[in-house]
Amino acid sequence: MLDSLPPINAEYADAATERGLALEVYEYAVIYSVKCGDKDSFQRYMSCLRPYYADCDCLNKSSNKATILGLKLLYLLVENRLSEFHCEIELLAESELKHPHIQFCTRIEQNIMIGSYEQVLHTAQSPPVPYYAFFVSSLLETVRTNIAECMQAAYKSLQVAEAMKLLMFNSEEETIDFISENYEHWEISSTKAIQFAPKEQVQKSDAIPSFKVMKEVLSYASELERIV
């Protein structure tokens, strides 16, 4: 074990070099865990990186910080941990907030908050780095589910072609596959019209949206009170 690494942080001639090397190893471990789709490893390596990102000597040698922090922000969005997302944003410097990799995440979060799901899907289709694709794909599924719930509440029936546009799929086949996998209670007629199930039969509508909104508002209020 190298005494120069956290939590000991012993100082000697090669200490900064050793910490810089460890930082690089953990950053690539984070990227590798994302490429493997391993969220548990991702969380573990992100936790290991935190003390290194607090070390100015290490930061001077890191060219991947914005990318790594962007991955963390996307992960928090996918997990719907919005209060933690905003805490992370508050800790970033002004220059970091202007970085394209960070701005990509903040744009998505802003569009989610105002319910502009089409903009979320549009933005998510052009991630700044390939590593973001793993979390972006999960986020797209979440957004499409929200759109589908809105469709169900707004229409009694809808043509598959129109649903395809709303869900921003590239083909009707993709749309039908999505419905088959997630909404077995919807019926698709021979004319490709989607018949939504009556609200009393839809289990996903049991949760009252207003209660969810109230929960999020109270969560933000508590977080603001803690910060102040």
Image (spheres, rainbow, N blue to C red):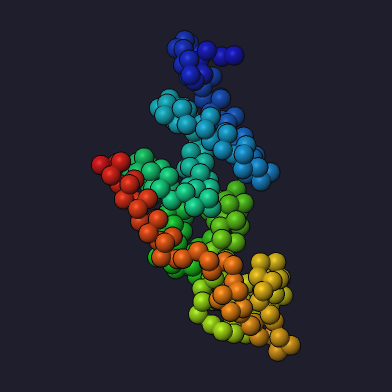
Q: Which residue is situated farthest in the top direction here? A: 12
Q: Nearer the viewer, residue 56 or 137?
A: 137
Q: Residue at x 53, y 50 (%)?
A: 79
Vertical arrangement, residue 74 with respect to residue 30, above or below? below
Q: Nearer the viewer, residue 12 or 92?
A: 92
Question: Where is residue 139 drawn, in percent x and y?
Answer: 56, 57
Tell me, yes or no, if residue 208 can be seen here. yes
Vertical arrangement, residue 12 with respect to residue 182, above or below? above
Vertical arrangement, residue 209 with respect to residue 9, above or below? below
Question: Where is residue 178 drawn, in percent x and y?
Answer: 67, 69
Q: Nearer the viewer, residue 69 or 159?
A: 159
Vertical arrangement, residue 61 with respect to residue 43, above or below? above
* Placement of the N terminus among the 4 image quadrants: top right
For residue 38, which quarter of the picture? top right
Q: Residue at x 30, y 46 (%)?
A: 224
Question: Where is residue 167 drawn, in percent x and y?
Answer: 58, 72
